[in-house]
Image: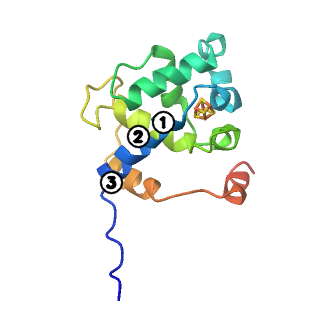
Amino acid sequence: MTPAPRPQPLREHLDRFIADTLARCTRCGRCVEACPMPGYSPTLPSQEPAAVVGGVIALLRQQGGSPAALEWVELCTQSGRCIKACPEGINVMKMVRVARMSALGSLGGPAQVASREEPDFFRKIGAFARLQFGDDEIESSHR
Ligand code: SF4
C-alpha cells in the first residue's frame, strides 16, 4: 500500500507558489484593474496597473515593494475578483496575501509595513494556503 502523501510544510508550499507565480505572471495588470479596492485609495487610481503588479512581484522576491504595491496589498479585502481576471490562472488573491507576508517581514526579509495585531496570523495563513476557491464560492462571497 502506498503511504499517504506527507503534508507540505507551509514554507515549502509558499516557496513553490512564489516560484510558480514568478514564472507565470506576465505583469499584464488585469488583476489590479479588476480589483474594487483602488477606488478607495487617493493614490492607486493614478498608478499603472502593470507597475503596481511589478511592485508586488518585487515583494514576492523579498525586495523592496513600491509604495503603490504596499498600499494595494494592505487594501486587499479578498473579494477574489482578481482570480477570475488573471489570464494565466494565477490565484492572485493568494499572491497578494503572500506579498503581504513578505511586506510584514514574515518570509525573512525586512518588514516594510507595520504589523496589525494578528496573534493567529500564521495559523490563518496555514489554513488559507490549503484553500482553493471554486467559481461558486467566489461568486457567493460577493452576495
Ligand atoms: S492578471 Fe495574472 S498575469 Fe496579469 S499581472 Fe495579475 S497576476 Fe500577473
* Nearest to N terminus: mark 2 or mark 3: 3
Q: Secondary structure at mark 3?
A: helix
Would you say the residues marked 2 and 3 are in contact, meaning their CB atoms lie under 8 Å apart? no
Q: In which quarter of the view is residue 75 placed?
A: top right
Q: Is residue 127 visible?
A: yes
Q: Nearer the viewer, mark 1 or mark 3?
A: 1
Image coordinates for residue 85, horizontal then vertical, percent: 70, 38
| Residue that mark 1 sits on | 23
Depth check: 61 or 108 in front? 61
Q: Viewed as shown, does residue 5 lie left or right of 85?
A: left
| Residue that mark 2 sits on | 19
Q: Secondary structure at mark 1?
A: helix
| Residue that mark 3 sits on | 10
| Circle 1: residue type | Ala
Q: In which quarter of the view is residue 7 placed?
A: bottom left
Depth check: 83 or 124 in front? 83
| Circle 3: residue type | Leu
Numbered tag placed on residue 2 in the rendering: none
Query: Who's the residue at 62% across and 20% down the image?
Result: 49
Image coordinates for residue 34, horizontal then vertical, percent: 70, 32
Above/below status of 132 relative to 94: below
Q: Is residue 96 visible?
A: no
- Can you say which quadrant of the picture contains the N terminus? bottom left
Query: Who's the residue at 35% across and 55% down the image?
Result: 123
